[in-house]
Every structure is written in C-alpha cells, then in structure tokens.
Amino acid sequence: MNRIIKEDETKEKVSVDSESRNFTDTVKRFADFDFRIKPEQVMSQMPFLAYLFLLLMLFIYNSHRSEKIIREADRLQQEVKDLRSEYISELSQLMGESKQSTVAKKLSPFGIKELKTPPSKITYRDEQ
C-alpha cells in the first residue's frame, strides 16, 4: 500500500501535530505555574478585562447601595416605633387631662365651677 504522499496531506498532519504540541505546552506551563503572558495577548484581551472591571465595580456599588438602603429602612422602622409609642403616651395623657373632674380642678383657681344641674334647652319660636 505504498503511495505517493501529496503536499496537502503532509501539511494537515503537521498542523494537527503543531496544535496538539501547543496544547500540550500550554498544559505543561499551567502545571508548572509558568504564567508568562505576551504583551500582545494582554492587549488583545483588554476590552474583555475592562468589561470585567466594569462589572466588578457595578457589583460592589450595588452591594454597598443595598446595604445602605437596608440600614436606612431599619433606622426608619425604629423611628416609626418610637413615634408611635410617643403618640400613644401623649394620647393617654390628653385623655386623662380632658376628663371632667381634671378640668374642674384646673379651673377652680379661676373661679369657674362645675355645673351641678344639667343645662336646659332654649327654644325660640318666631311668631309672625
């Protein structure tokens, strides 16, 4: 089965062998922790690295902002609780102050006394 090898067949074998050799060399460099990168490789990856950097900055900003919003919501919730308790205490104090007996005691130094008889209704008839 001898035959004449054409140039195309030799080029294909050589290119496959060189690709496998490149892959093998790459794996060997990673295994040896040899991360020498050529400047051309870095420059070709710059747009992608800039995109990753932008995403990283957006992620950090988003996490800080969400933490700030959570802290603000907790602070406002505590303020609402404080104001509600203050409202309830002021309302109960006002209810106590507006009782008829308390009002009568406060007005007694001015000479105003509590009525003992109920008020009477005055009616007006217009006769014409």
Image (cartoon, rainbow, N blue to C red):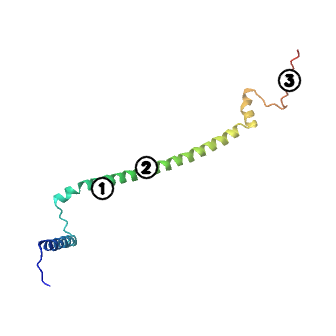
Neighbour tally class for label 2: few under 14, some 14-19, many 20 plus, Cα within 10 Å: few
Please tell me which of labels 2 and 1 falls first in the chain: 1
Q: Height in image: 2 above or below 110?
A: below
Name the residue carrying label 1. 52
Q: Nearer the viewer, residue 79 or 106?
A: 79
- Say if 81 sits above or below 101 in the image: below
Please report the residue visible at 61 percent of the width from the left and 42 percent of the height from the top.
Answer: 87
Q: How much space separates mark 2 and mark 3, taking CA atoms?
A: 67 Å
Nearer-the-camera pick, 35 or 14: 14
Task: Name, please, the residue furthest toward the bottom.
Answer: 1
Check disc 3 and report the residue beneath it. 123
Could you tell me the amino acid type at mark 3? Thr
Q: CA distance from mark 2 to mark 1?
A: 24 Å
Q: Based on the displayed image, in which of its 4 quarters is residue 25 positioned? A: bottom left
Foreground mark, 2 or 1, reads 1
SS at badge 2: helix
Q: Residues within 10 Å of mark 1 (few under 14, many from 20)?
A: few
Secondary structure at badge 3 equals loop
Spatial CA distance of label 3 from label 1 is 88 Å
Q: Residues within 10 Å of mark 3 (few under 14, many from 20)?
A: few
Residue 91 placed where, x, y %?
A: 65, 41
Q: Is disc 2 in contact with disc 3, using a CB cutoff of under 8 Å?
A: no
Residue 8 vertical position relative to residue 60 in the rendered view, above or below: below
Q: Are marks 3 and 1 in contact (CB under 8 Å)?
A: no
Q: Inspect the image, locate mark 1, and give the three-letter code of the amino acid beneath it.
A: Leu
Image spot of residue 43 (x, y percent) = 20, 55
Residue lying at the far right of the rendered structure: 127
Residue tagged 2 = 68
* Comparing labels 3 and 1, the label whose residue is closer to the camera: 1
Write the residue at 19% across / 68% down.
34
Percent x, y of residue 59: 36, 54
Closer to the camera in the image, 112 or 93: 93
